[in-house]
Image: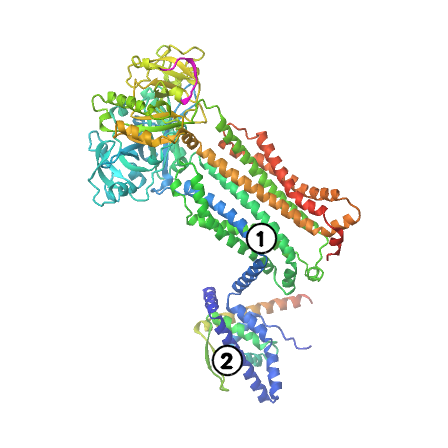
Amino acid sequence: MSENKSDVLQGTLDLMVLKTLESMGTLHGYGIARRIEQVSGDTLSLNQGTIYPALLRLEQRGWIKSEWGVSETNRRAKFYAMTRAGHKQLVRETENWERMAATMARLLSVTSGSSN
Amino acid sequence: MERVRVLLNRVASLCRGKNLDEELDEELRAHIELATIENVRRGMKADEARTAALRSFGGVTQVRESYRKQRGLPWLGQIVRDARFAARQLRKSLGFTLTAVLTLALGIGATTSVFSVIHAVLLRPFAFREPDRLVMVREVQNAENSRAEIAPFNYRHFLRLKKTAKTLEDIAIFQNRAYSVSPDGEHPHMVGGLESSPNLLPMLGIQPILGRGFTESDAAQGAQPVTLLSYNAWQAIFGGNANVVGQMLRLGGEPVTVIGVLPEGLRFPQLALAPKIEFAPSAATREVQVYRPMVPRPEMLTEDNGMFNYKVMARLKDGVTPAQSASELETLQRSYTASAKLQIPIGAVVTPLAKDAAQGISGALWLLLAAVGAVLLIACVNLANLQLARAVNAEHETALRAALGASKMQLIMARLTESMLLALAGGVAGGALAVGGVRLLIALAPANLPRLDEVRVSLPVLAFAAAISMLAAIVFGLLPALRSLGVDPQAALRANMARTSDSLEALRTRNVMVGSQVACTIVLLIVTALVLRSFSRLLHEERGFDTSHVTYLQVAMLAPKYDDSKPGYKAAKLNFVDRTMVALRALPGVQSVALTSAVPLTGETWVDLLTRPDHPVPDAEKPMVNVRWINPDYLATMQMRLELGRDFTESDRANPFVALISERTAREGFGGENPIGHAMSNIVPDGEHAVTIVGVVADTRINGLKDNAAMVYVPYWTYVPWTISLMVRSAQPGTGLMAEMRRAVWAIDPEVTVQAVKSLDAQLNDSIATERFQAIVLGGFGLAALLLALLGVYGVLAYSVSLRHREFGIRIALGSGKGKLFELVLKQAAVPVLMGVGVGLAVALVAIRWVRSLLYQTPVLDPVAIGGSVLLLLAAATVAAIVPARRAALVDPMRSLRTE
């Protein structure tokens, strides 16, 4: 079976960005994108550019904040970090996701069971 | 909460657009660089690294797009873009734009002007405390042999209700008076005044800004005479002097103390004594400037069966409806009739104040609004037709947008934006025009239009103008906008734009629009025709008197020497009147001078019950008559006809207790018998003498053109009222001698006031001013509607002929005669026009029922009005259709077939 690079929905991208920032601290846009790619192990088809509208969205909602700084290559770049509200949102969204996943899993196992 | 944050963020970034763009670009550049560096570290070559970085990034333009969508208010940008584009398109077809804006400006301006009048006169509440609880109360006289008559109030009955009515929080009595004010050294002039019970102004919530209001002690017998001044009176008479309280003012010759000044905006509404009694004060006395407490004379406190002379206003208790109060008052009145054994049973009616003040004019005004609204609608349909034609030409552009992925909403907005811009421009221009329009309406309006001085273009009126602009935009913009949704991109983008045929759907749409215009026009024309015929009938009714070449003066003998406390006042009045009439007759060109006790054409007054000593009859069965005191030249001056018996002569001065009656009085009071020689009592104020009838005068409409009245004429030697009207007939037209007449009067006694000097023709015009106003304005609107409908028929027909150019060329080439083509086009026009007439007639038959109350003796199904309107419209439509039909017949087949 060829790899199914699934398209990433808006909301889940937000969740991934928040999680990344929580574990990595402060990162610039490229760093966040690379980290998500690495962690997902190439199962995601993510055009790296789509990170930027997501970052703006999160910033508008007050869950992350941004600051211009200097990268490791001595280049000017925008760095992002979580806010306190962002931490709370991450907890909430993680719970939602896990609940959804559990429900789906139960639903799918029931169906495959009865088809036997 | 989140949404608000996001929204604020978006709005904030609207301003920083450029900066944020640059920041994003820098961020993206940084991203690509970092990715490139990492790729190089992995081992790729420089340019390979960069290409790979770009590839894994994805589309930069798309990222920028979705970033911008997230960032600002994208729909706002879209609107601005649409507006700019629409403005450019409009500038390209300047002719259409100017026509559209002008049509809209006129339509919206006219509608706004009419609404300004309606808002000030009918809708805006009075500036009193809780004005919706204020009501006017009137008595009802239930005479047995005639209909119940609504009458003014009797003072004793008022006192009774004041004591016993439970549904009323407060009740006040008042009457309008005219006072002569004598500033030092000048001739006295008249001002309007109001005499009231002391609680009237507090009941309305009015407090003086200087001094104090009236108290009960001011209304007691023998109290020191006091007055409250209106703000304008204070400015005019005392120059706004802050020390006016305590100063003296001569009112009617007697000194009166000023105790206070009332607030600036106070305008006491004009209220009729009773529906039949017209209140037509002269311009000088219309505005109430002087307020006085009503000190009841002894007879007012004892008289139960007569003296229905006053107006009563009341405040309902909280939560009580006028109907509830009316039934309580009616019951109280009935029980009083029984307990006091009144000669005529009485009842009561309660009318909300706002409705009462607008009585008689509200129907006419709403009709005007409906008419002008119809004109605006017709104009909008015209514009819609024009827009449809333009939309066809813009199909190319619409198709392009659709092909590029525009959503349905975006397509509609693109088309609608043009209409909105037009409506905006039209609305602003219309608002400006309305300022002038309001002034025009005020100039045309009858002078006794209530609250006329409050009519202006105010904020609610401007809001109304904005609202109908939006409505207009939607009405004429929606159709072409919806049409743009049905455009097939493939067909429209084809290079060959030749249209050889007209889609059936488009034809049907246009026909429906023309049909609806015609229908609106027919309704408006029929209503206008009815009103015009009614007005014409009113003017041409047999009047029984002649107003041309007659000037009248109203003179008030309000100087101290004529006061009834002075001995010999009667002789003084008689002397003045005799000498004045001699002096007036001596003026050059004067043919005769008449005297009467009431100004002609101002309604019924001095109404008494006809009492015959030889034929006693209970009061309830006595007819009511208007009594007038006249001189022997009266009939000749007014050119009234004598039917029976004789006129008064100078020799009657020795034995003056004679009378003339009108035909109606003879009919109502004497049945078939010859009234000459019979006596009537209760006519002369001294209460002692009866008068003997010596003649019968033909019926005249001397009180008002709408009705003839039952009159009794008595010579002035029996009684001279304090206010008299002198009518002067001269060879010159009415206005020639006015200054001389004033001088002649003041030469005899400089202390009398000359209240009005006017030609009787002008007075006649003023008495029908409301009907004339209606006729003029409706006529104007009807004409406008006809013209617009004409333009509509012409425009649509011309357009469809232009579409069928090739077809006509082919037909002619194939041998069809020109006459046939002419017929063809006319037939095409006939379909929507005839359908429109049919629908319009049906609607009109329903609508004219509402107009019935405004018409004078004109049946609503008047064949001349209806038939005439239909013929007029058909004629106009035929004229409109002829030009395009001719153009169709004159098509040159060679030229049309060659054109692509």
Label 2, on which residue?
A28
Q: Residue B378 placed where, x, y %? A: 57, 45
The quarter of the picture where the C terminus of chain B appears is bottom right
Indicate left or right for B468 with B884 as reference. Answer: left
Q: Which mark is residue B477?
A: 1
Q: Quadrant of residue B134?
A: top left
Q: Residue B674 placed where, x, y %? A: 42, 10
Residue span colored magenta: B638-648
The answer to whether one can see residue B198 in this image is: no
The quarter of the picture where the N terminus of chain B appears is bottom left
Question: How packed is label 1: few (under 14 Cα within 10 Å), some, or many (20 or more)?
Answer: many
In this view, the residue in front, A39 or B835, is B835
The residue located at (52%, 43%) in the rendering is B373
The answer to whether one can see residue B771 in this image is: yes
Q: Quadrant of residue B92?
A: bottom right
> For residue B642: magenta?
yes
> For residue B268: magenta?
no
Farthest-out residue, front? B588
From the image, state whether disc 2 or disc 1 is nearer to you: 1
